[in-house]
Structures are given as C-alpha cells and as structure tokens.
Image (spheres, rainbow, N blue to C red):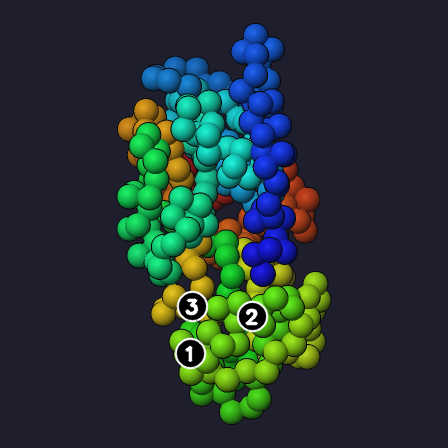
Amino acid sequence: MFTARARKGLTGLAVATVTLIALTGCASSNPLDSGSSASAGGGGSSIVVGSQDYYSNEIIAEIYAQALEGAGQTVDRKFTIGQRDAYIPLLENGTITLFPEYTGNLLQFFDKTTTARTSADVYAALPKALPSGLEVLDQSTATDGDSYTVTKAFADKYNLKTIADLSKVTEPLTLGGNAELAQRPYGPTGLKDTYSVDVAFSATGATTVDDLVAGTVNIANVYTSEPRIQTDNLVVLQDPKGLFLSSNVVPVVNSKVAAQVKDVINKVSAKLTPEGLVALNVESTVDQKSPADIAKKWLSDNGLS
C-alpha cells in the first residue's frame, strides 16, 4: 500500500530539484520563511524544524518545535517541504536541522539492499547507513507503515494479538488491500511463508477499510497511523517476525545540533505511541484542528509543557 499514500508518493526528480532550488536560493529574500517563531532566552544555534508535505508529519514536527521552544530554544519552522529527495540535502547542509522521519523508509533511502525488517534491526542499521553529518535520536514506538488489521469484534472472537494468531482462526480468511498487494513480498505469499496463514485476496483498493468494517473481508492492509483505527475501533496485529518493514517515527538531526536538542526530543519520542499518533491524526482529519493546537494539547497532556 505504500504506493497509494501521499507522503510515500514520488515527487519526481524535477519537482525535487525545483523545491531544492527554491529552498536554498537567495538568502536576502529568505525563501525558507514559512512562519518561524523564536523563544527568548534560547542558547546555542537556532533549530530549524522541517516537515514533509503530509499532515501527520507536520503535526509531529510542530510537537518538536513547541517542545524545544518550551525549553527555551529558538526555533524556525520550515514545513511542507516535500519528499526525501528535496529535504535530505537540506538536512545535510544544515538549512534544516531537525526532521521527523520513519525508520524503515529512511533506511531504504540510503541502503536499498538492506535486509533489516524488525524495529530493532532497522534502528540498529540506521547509524551506519546515514551520511556523515546526520544522525537519529531515540525512535518512538509510534509507527506509520503497513499492517494487517482486523475489527475489534473479530480480534476478540479469536483472541488475536499478532499476525501469527490468524493461524488459529477457524473461518475462511480474506485479505483486502490495493491490487498490487497480491504481488508484494508481504502479501498473501509472504503471509503464508512467514506466518503459515492462508488467505484469499480481494482487491478492495480505496474501500479497504469500508470492506473490513462491513465484513466483506476480515483482514485488511491498513496504515498503522490511519485515523479510522480509532474511529472504527480496529485492531492492528503485531508483527513480531518482521513481515512488514518497520516504520517507527524517529527524529533525524544534523549532527551540529544533536547535543542541543536530544534531551528534549528524546522525551517527546518516549511519549509518542502508536495509539497516540492515530489520535493526533483523528484530531487533524476528523476534528479539523490545526497542527499548532494539536501539538500544544498533546504536550500538555503528556506533561511536556
């Protein structure tokens, strides 16, 4: 399902190049000024927080920014930059100094042949894969990637907690997802090879969650940060064997500011959970709250403001 997600979509080399030029152009016109803010009394360099052009990523970036401001740091916000081809060079040259990322996709950007899949293995592989001058801080348990998800009623009926538990279901299993899932390594064949679970497949596409809720399918390939996990009372099955590439939220920083931000940002990562990220996305998509308001409330609720 990665190809269907806006934040995972390719911007194309031309778009990335235009974005990069626009963001690194004439300093006198300050082309990076997209609504900066400063907090009095902050020591050290100004921290420039960036985000992808994706609402969930922008919310996390705003949380980083407000947390740093609350600690007395000076922060500039440079949000909705685009995809990795555009913003990774900006992180490397210090135009952007802090960015919320996703472990598996970040690792594959730099190491396309990696075999790491689980959360621990992917995170352990990142330091060696990143170019000199970039590093990651603590990863959170929050994830934004593929999953196999079921309704709570179905999970309760068969006491399902992990993908492996599907093998004890006594009724026929039908997996719903985008058409290309049928050929993905984590699709029906991977499910059989990794967890010994046999499924039929239904190309449900854009109606995948609707079909799951309606019972047309009883398993669905759903993103772990999908707001409907909360609003439709769905259960994401754990993936202990790493069928899916792990995609934990992780801060990536320019090494020049790592020491300046790590204590504050690591506290944020420690509080950001899978359920919490879904709830943040619900506040954005359902409640229509701004990233700034969502971040302010989250920091307060988690004792970080």
Task: Say which mark, if any, is on residue 78.
Answer: none
Q: Kindly identify the residue that appears in the image at 56 percent across and 56 percent down.
A: 2
Ranked by sequence position, the earlier of labels 3 and 2 is 2
Q: Mark 3 or mark 1, which is nearer the start of the sequence?
A: 1
| Rendered position, 236 above or below 85 | below
Residue occupying the point 38% across, 54% down: 113
Q: CA distance from mark 1 to mark 3?
A: 10 Å
Outermost residue toward the bottom? 170
Mark 2 nearby-residue class (10 Å; few <14, some 14–19, many ≥20) = few
Quadrant where the N terminus is found in the figure:
bottom right
Q: Is residue 170 left or right of residue 112?
A: right
Judging depth in this view, the residue of 201 and 261 nearest the camera is 201
Three-letter amino acid code at the position of disc 2: Gln
Q: Residue 193 shows which numbered tag? A: 1
Report the front residue among 113 and 122. Answer: 113
Q: Position of residue 81 (x, y in %)?
A: 57, 32
Mark 2 sits on what residue? Answer: 183
**Circle 3 Cα neighbour tier, 10 Å, few/some/many (<14 / 14–19 / ≥20):** many
Secondary structure type for disc 2: helix
Using the image, tell me which numbered label, if any, was put on residue 243: 3
Q: What distance separates the C-alpha of mark 2 from that of mark 1?
A: 14 Å
Query: As shown in the figure, which amino acid type bears the numbered disc 1?
Result: Asp
Q: Residue 57 falls in which quadrant of the image?
A: top right
Q: Amino acid at mark 3?
A: Leu
Task: Name the quadrant containing residue 101.
Answer: top left
* Percent of width and height locating residue 66: 48, 31
Q: Is residue 130 visible in this depiction of the protein?
A: yes
Whether residue 126 is situated above or below residue 75 in the rendered picture: below
Q: Note whether residue 234 is visible.
A: no
In front of the other: label 2 or label 1?
2
On the image, the x and y values in percent for residue 224 come to 52, 59
